[in-house]
Image (cartoon, helix red, strand yellow):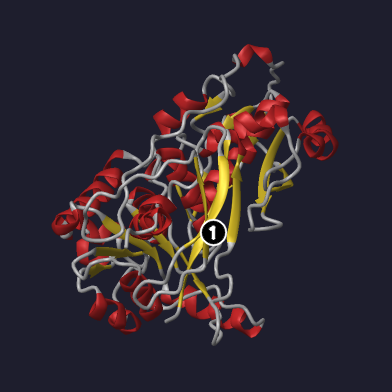
């Protein structure tokens, strides 16, 4: 009996499913349809939304569900001339805090405010985890590239000018993704009176859902968030070396590797809090290992963890994937004293953020701002293979809908992408 054409297509789609996961939504206009996949092995799949232009690509034969990078996205704005905005003699100062996932948002807000007010933006210092301690901007980021990238939209000073250093600066609290209306009502009157301000950004929500549209300011925020913050040369060299070692350890997968955001202390705290509310959206090392194995990753796959040093809670993952590394295992020995000590958490956070942004596959063990901003950076660079595990409920007759649509609108990049969790049963 001849095989039904629909069965042939279903079989092809089953094999190519993961290759298309990260490429589900294109930058141009597209048609959306849904298709059900038959269950394979022990992994439970129900419905996975696919956005394509009715095109089915045969997958490349590889040791695992890898896919090629997409084309990097092009900015959808034109940089306006600095002279288009009336300039003042005042200064805007601020500090970076926490990690790079916060830095990109803090810089974006500061750029937007300085541009609106016509003020000079002073490059921030970086607060350390120890109270009262701080680092210079150029210890982690490339100051010259930052000034060059922002120079056409806002005046930038490398150091705080003397006129902004005399006396105590007025501090203004700023909500993340600040609107033009908020600046006009809450910040501009204070700036016109005081002349110089210090910003303190707070994050009223970490879900990254779309805020009210601020059409005039969006392009400046996006310019600041994508491509402006680049690591200083020595730190970038360390990241490149670590990525190189991961790729050398994964030769059977063409040098491709998986980065997993998994820090056991954060995971332990957040899982306890979320599960107390009846939610299961964080996963431990063993669950991540089972997840990656069930969706087809080979035992020889190299895996990078954001955990700084090895902890016994990670043993179960290494039993499944022996080539699982933390920073301690792949950082050049001569760099560990500087970048992997008890006083270098800011360096470690930067390393994690940029390796997770450069990996071939990114898997978050827990959601949050780190996940959201890593995803934004990956999409902008065309690295769209992002796999999010999700719990499913299995009945005796059917598998319930097990994907979660996590909409992350990066409107400045002229597209919208829906992230879909891959359901599995540990």
Circle 1 is placed at which residue position? 132
Given residues 5 and 264, the one toward you in this image is: 5
Given residues 354 and 334, the one toward you in this image is: 354
Given residues 58 and 282, the one toward you in this image is: 58
* Residue at the (56%, 80%) spot, across then down: 393
- Where residue 403 sits in the image (x, y, percent)? 55, 65
CA neighbours of label 1 inside 10 A, class few (<14), some (14 to 19), many (20+): few
- Where residue 394 sits in the image (x, y, percent)? 53, 82
Residue 22 showing in the rendered view: yes
Viewed as shown, does residue 135 lie left or right of 335?
right
- Where residue 316 sits in the image (x, y, percent)? 30, 83
The part of the image, by quadrant, that contains residue 302 is bottom left
The part of the image, by quadrant, that contains residue 136 is top left
- Where residue 25 sits in the image (x, y, percent)? 51, 44
* Residue at the (20%, 74%) spot, across then down: 322
Viewed as shown, does residue 322 lie left or right of 192?
left
Quarter of the figure that contains the N terminus: bottom left
* Residue at the (39%, 45%) spot, across then down: 56
Viewed as shown, does residue 34 lie left or right of 287?
right
The part of the image, by quadrant, that contains residue 97 is bottom right
């Amino acid at each position: 009996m001849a095989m039904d054409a629909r069965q042939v297509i279903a079989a092809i789609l089953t094999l190519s499913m993961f290759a298309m996961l990260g490429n589900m939504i294109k930058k141009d206009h597209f048609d959306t349809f849904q298709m059900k996949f038959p269950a394979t092995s022990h992994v439970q799949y129900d419905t996975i939304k696919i956005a394509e232009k009715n095109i089915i690509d045969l997958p490349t034969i590889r040791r695992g569900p890898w896919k090629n990078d997409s084309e990097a996205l092009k900015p959808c704005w034109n940089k306006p001339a600095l002279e288009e905005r009336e300039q003042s003699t005042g200064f805007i100062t601020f500090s970076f805090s926490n990690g790079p996932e916060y830095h990109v948002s803090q810089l974006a807000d500061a750029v937007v405010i300085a541009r609106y007010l016509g003020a000079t933006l002073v490059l921030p210092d970086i607060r350390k985890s120890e109270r009262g301690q701080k680092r210079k901007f150029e210890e982690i980021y490339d100051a010259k590239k930052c000034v060059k990238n922002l120079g056409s939209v806002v005046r930038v000073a490398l150091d705080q000018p003397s006129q902004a250093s005399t006396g105590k600066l007025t501090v203004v609290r700023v909500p993340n993704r600040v609107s033009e209306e908020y600046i006009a009502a809450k910040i501009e009157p204070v700036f016109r009176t005081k002349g110089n301000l210090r910003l303190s950004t707070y994050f009223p929500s970490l879900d990254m859902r779309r805020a009210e549209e601020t059409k005039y300011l969006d392009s400046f925020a996006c310019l600041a968030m994508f491509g402006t913050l680049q690591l200083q040369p020595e730190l970038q060299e360390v990241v490149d070396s670590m990525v190189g070692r991961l790729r050398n350890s994964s030769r059977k997968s063409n040098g491709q590797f998986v980065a997993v955001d998994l820090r056991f202390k954060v995971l332990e705290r957040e899982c306890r809090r979320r599960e107390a509310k009846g939610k299961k959206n964080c996963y431990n090392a063993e669950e991540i290992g089972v997840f990656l194995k069930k969706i087809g990753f080979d035992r020889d796959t190299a895996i990078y963890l954001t955990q700084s040093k090895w902890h016994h809670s990670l043993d179960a993952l290494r039993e499944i994937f022996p080539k699982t590394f933390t920073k301690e295992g792949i950082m050049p020995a001569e760099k560990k004293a500087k970048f992997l000590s008890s006083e270098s958490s800011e360096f470690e956070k930067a390393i994690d953020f940029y390796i997770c942004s450069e990996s071939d596959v990114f898997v978050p063990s827990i959601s949050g701002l780190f996940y959201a901003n890593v995803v934004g950076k990956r999409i902008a660079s065309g690295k769209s293979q992002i796999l999010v595990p999700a719990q499913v409920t299995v009945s005796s007759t059917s598998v319930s809908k097990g994907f979660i649509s996590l909409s992350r609108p990066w409107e400045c990049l002229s597209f919208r992408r829906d992230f879909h969790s891959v359901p599995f049963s540990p």
